[in-house]
Amino acid sequence: MNGSVIAKTEKKINELLPQSPEGMAVTLFVIAMASYYLWRMFAITPNYDELYTYYNFVSRGPLYSAIHWPLPNNHVGYSILSALLYRCGNSYIALRGVSYVAAIVNLILVYRICRKYYSHAIPFGAVVLYASMQIVNDYSVLGRGYTLATTCFLLSIYYIGYICRLGADKKSYYYLFGGTLVLGMYIVPSSIYWVVPVWASGAIFLFINAMRSKGVYSSISENIYYGKLRKLLDTAVVSMTIVILLYMIIWLAIGSNILVSSEDSAFFELSHFSVIIKAPLKSVMTGMKYMMSHSYIQRLSSAAFGKRLCSWFMSLLNSLVPKFSIMTLLFLLISLGCLFYECFKHFEYSRTVINLVVIVNLMFLGIVLFSLHTLPYLRIFGYVAFVIVLCVCTALERLINVGIRLYNRRKLIARGDEGIKSHEEIETVEKGDKWYSGIGIYIPVIVIVILFIFRFFDPGFSCQIAERENNVFNTLYVAEVTKRQSIAVLDCDQQYLLKFGWDIDCDKTDVEGADCVLLDKNMFDPNYNGEDLWKFYQTYRTIDWDYLSSMHVRYENDKFILYTK
């Protein structure tokens, strides 16, 4: 009996382990990147947005995170998940643990998606290229919802591929697909930029195939593509309803808070519970109006939009692969030609779904930008990294297939088989006598690996992303804050970092009576109006300089002075 159990266990383990050289290479690469991301999670000091998230949401629990929306940068779904990890006792794990897991899962999903549609080691190259992108690296373990939203994006593509494939499908695919759309929207509302295109890609694919196959089925009810399209429509309706219900909870909380706080409101100074019971609809509408009016969507004039569009787009490409934005644009244009060609010429190819995902995503982004005259923050477009990866994969696959056809034709002619013509979705090389015969198909992947090495050892790849916050954090270590009795925080970075690093809740914002003061040197300037002014609780005119002069300087660098008693 024991021998049988051991044999079955060994069999299951062997089934889970990668068998192909490519699978082994991907596994080793993912393990290496997981180690790097683990180092990055603890080595990189959180930036302001992360600290704000930790201080205002994660540290206050999942329920608080679910019903509060003071600013649009609250990634509600992510904050709730991170708040659940807060109990583990480590602030880094609580803030960044979800992103860390998502970053590793993303690498696996990139491989599993590309493995279904590409060959010639391109799936491995796709994983390496994706990991080499700056925006992917910067947000890999960031304590924000961008990486997790990208996970939802990749999962939605993964499941739409299963839904659109030929033959019967499982209901679970629709549930899982709908779940990724809901979670993506709940994590970051800007996920709408990919939620609509991914769903539309599947709908377009199924609709066209339903029209193409009308003659095969005797009635619409028997047409498998119409059946799938109807289920996909139902999934969209249900998903949208769930998203609205989830946000209604936030609208209800926001609206009731506004109504009880406004002096001109009929519900002024009533309890939140009373307002929610007496006027739930008014609370929801008030909260929704507040959220919409604070969406941070900046519309530009036609002239300003036209002037800034090109530089914005190049900045987006540069955020993917710095110093290679022109080459990225070139691959994008070439791949679009290949994508449209395959859609019109070979709609039956298995890659048609993934081709539509790329085309519709790019078209939808263009439509939104031009219709709203807005240029959103680049950080919300982390998912575009995978879109560009697919573009590169498409261009390389086309290049390799054409090269193989020319190579095979030459070898066939040399053997006298001139009548044989090869034209398949995935071409295979006619092997020769030499060991290196056909090895040229791996040159593109080798180039990608070299690019990754170049990017990985670039100083900007792994540097701190928040210089000021890192400076403050290091200085607070010097201050030995756990030994202090009365710490004064003169800006929000100090306040948030004390909570993050030492779990110290500090509300003292004046220097009088303090035994530890960290002073930004910009506060010496009475006319300072720089980029950090909005973070300051005190300025040159409000600081008690007489008391500060009674303290001694413990530490000083080019940005800060640490005073202690």
Image: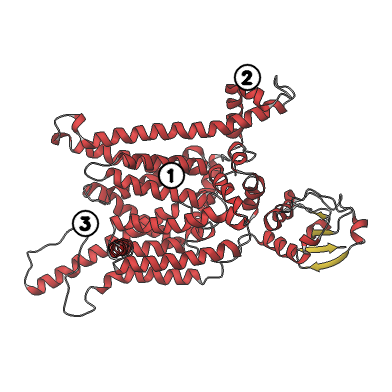
Looking at the image, do the residues carrying marks 2 and 3 touch, with CB atoms under 8 Å apart? no
| Marked residue nearer the N-terminal end (2 or 3) | 2
Identify whether 275 is placed above or below 131: above
On screen, residue 300 versus residue 168, left or right, reads right
On screen, residue 122 versus residue 151, left or right, reads left
Q: Which residue is mark 1?
A: 194
User: SS class of the residue under badge 3?
Assistant: loop
Q: Which residue is mark 2?
A: 278
Look at discs 2 and 3 and give the one toward the viewer.
2
* Residue 425 image label: 3
State the image coordinates of residue 370 (x, y, percent, origin top left).
47, 41
* Colour pattern of the rendering: secondary structure
Quarter of the picture containing the N terminus is bottom left
* Residue 364 image label: none
Relative to the observer, which residue lies in front, 150 or 295? 150
User: SS class of the residue under badge 2?
Assistant: helix
Q: Amino acid at mark 1?
A: Trp
Q: Cα distance, mark 1 to mark 2?
A: 38 Å
State the image coordinates of residue 136 (x, y, percent, origin top left).
49, 58
Identify whether 544 is placed above or below 80: below
Q: Cα distance, mark 1 to mark 3?
A: 27 Å
Q: Amino acid at mark 2?
A: Lys
Q: Amino acid at mark 3?
A: Glu
Q: Does residue 28 appear in the picture of this structure?
A: yes
Quarter of the picture containing the C terminus is bottom right
Res. 224 image quadrant: top left
